[in-house]
Image: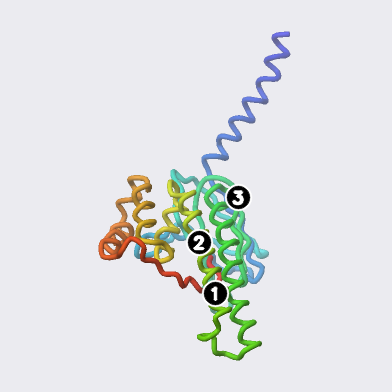
Amino acid sequence: MKKHSLFILIPFLLGACQQQEGVHAYHIQGTIDEAENGTEVLLQLDKEQSLEVLERTQVQNHQFTFSGRQDSAMECTITYIIKGNKMGATFFLENGQIKMDLSNETSQITGTPNNNNYQQFLNKINAIYAQIGSAYNDASEEKGTEHEEDTELKQKVDSLNRKANELIAQTISENIANPVGYYLLCRFNQNLTAAQQESFINRLPIHLKRTNAIEDLKSQLSILPPDSVNTDTTNFEDFD
């Protein structure tokens, strides 16, 4: 009986060791359908004022890979050039299996907690902006190109903009303790009231409160009324 128990324990321990090793390493498996063999792909760290190249590789059969270890999740960018056009996508470099499906139209980056949360946000916010674009297009076809006096259109767009702002605030709130919340706060601060921004800043982890981006945001907030917000979030370009 004792020998049988030992035999069962050994493969269990081996499996646990393999799982632990995977958690402490990242592996990026990427696909770029439009890329030719030899296309260079850069993995870059997003610093506050610049991009720092961490690794580079080349596409083979539309595929590329990066592997390594990461102490903590960091905001990064994948960049490459297709037919003379520089392309890029924001993601979060963290340990785990990261899958990237990149294209000129839209990109999907998933597989790890921060990237899943960010991709879910992108899918929702881009859907809202697509609705706004469709509303303007429909109005143009029906009433010409002048939208200023179209009350029905304005009400519809304002409603969608409020929906976008609510999504932004909700996603930041749910992710304020991780890099996704910090990144969205810095990028979409104009879509939040001054009071919301101040509340989110107060909830940031200590190391994220001390960045130049947050210090600049604090300076802007000092001269804004608490309820000020940019209600026009219209942007017809997909976010990466």
User: How far across and down, in percent of the image, does residue 166 sit?
Assistant: 50, 59
Q: Residue furthest front?
A: 151
Q: Marks 1/3: CA distance? A: 38 Å
Q: Residues within 10 Å of mark 1 (few under 14, many from 20)?
A: few
Which is nearer the N-term, disc 2 or disc 3?
2
User: 130 left or right of 208?
Assistant: right
Amino acid carrying mark 1 in the image:
Gln
* Label 3 residue SS: loop
Q: Residues within 10 Å of mark 3 (few under 14, many from 20)?
A: some
Q: Quadrant of residue 136?
A: bottom right
Which is nearer the N-term, disc 2 or disc 1?
2
Q: Which residue is mark 2?
A: 90
User: How far across and down, in percent of the image, does residue 221 sit?
Assistant: 30, 61
Amino acid carrying mark 2 in the image:
Thr
* Label 2 residue SS: strand
Residue at the spot x=57%, y=90% of the render?
Answer: 145
> Foreground: 157 or 117?
157
Q: Marks 2/1: CA distance? A: 33 Å
User: 63 left or right of 201?
Assistant: right
Q: Give the color scheme: rainbow, by chain, secondary structure or one colour.
A: rainbow
Discs 2, 3 touching: Cβ within 8 Å: no
Residue at the spot x=56%, y=34% of the render?
Answer: 20
> Foreground: 218 or 116?
218
Q: Which residue is mark 1?
A: 155
Q: Residue furthest top?
A: 1
Amino acid carrying mark 3 in the image:
Gly
Q: Nearer the viewer, mark 2 or mark 1?
A: 1
Q: Which mark is residue 111?
A: 3
Q: Marks 2/3: CA distance? A: 14 Å
